Amino acid sequence: MNKVILTGRMVAEPELKTTTSGIETTTFRIAVNRDYVKQGEERKADFFNVVAWRQTAAFICKYFRKGDGINLVGNLQSRQYEAKDGTNRYVVEVIADNVEFPLSKKSDNNSSQNTYTPPVQTPPTTAPPAPSADFQNMPVDDDLPF
């Protein structure tokens, strides 16, 4: 299985490009903080190259800017190419299939817009049905054979 889930910050402004066949694409980098921090050191981050295509690329370029948080789901893809100096280069990229806005940590009056509140369940207005005769004749746990 090839699946990548990342939460990070956009390192630069995304730029929407169009291929010669008319397909929209964007390439950008995100910084993802590492979970572990050595005592006395600053938190380190890893930087990943991300590619998005079609509607996902258009969505990213429309709604995300440098410094914005981003959640993405995709897969890893490797490719090899020859650089201008004639050397072979090997690249691993994240191909983004789905992107989302991360939840906000703001504690302002609009914080309820970024949270989910389950619906309140009201008690039933009628009494539950009486148990059937089959359940009334069931053996007690001590009488079960297993």
Image (spheres, helix red, strand yellow):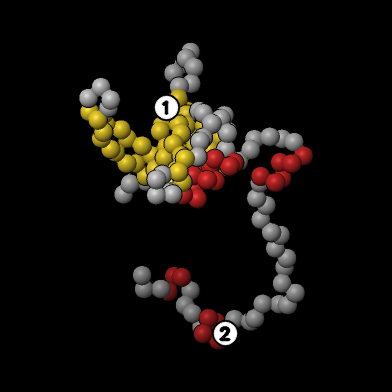
* Rendering coords of residue 55 (x, y %): 50, 50
Q: Amino acid at mark 1?
A: Asp
Left or right of 84, for residue 69: right
Image point 38% across, 39% down: which residue? 94
Visible residue check, residue 102: no
Quadrant position of residue 69: top right
**What is the residue that sits farthest to the top in this orientation?**
40
**Taking 66 as reference, is 93 left or right?**
left
Q: Can you identify the residue that label 1 sits on?
A: 46
Q: Nearer the viewer, residue 47 or 40?
A: 47
Q: Residues within 10 Å of mark 2 (few under 14, many from 20)?
A: few
* Residue density around tag 1, few if under 14, some if 14–19, many if 20 or more, within 10 Å: few
In the image, 129 versus 108, the foreground residue is: 108
- Residue drawn at x 43%, y 49% as measured from the top left: 23
Q: Which residue is mark 2?
A: 132
Residue 27 coordinates in the image, percent (x, y): 44, 36
The residue at 42%/40% (across/down) is 51
Q: Is residue 41 above or below residue 72?
A: above
**Amino acid type shown at disc 2:** Ser
**At which x and y percent is residue 4?**
39, 42
Do the CB atoms of the residues marked 1 and 2 lie less than 8 Å apart?
no
Which secondary structure lies at badge 2? loop
Determine if residue 124 is in view: yes
Distance between the Cα atoms at labels 1 and 2?
62 Å
39 is higher (above) or lower (below) than 112: above
Outermost residue, front direction? 20
Q: Which mark is residue 8?
A: none
Secondary-structure class at tag 1: strand
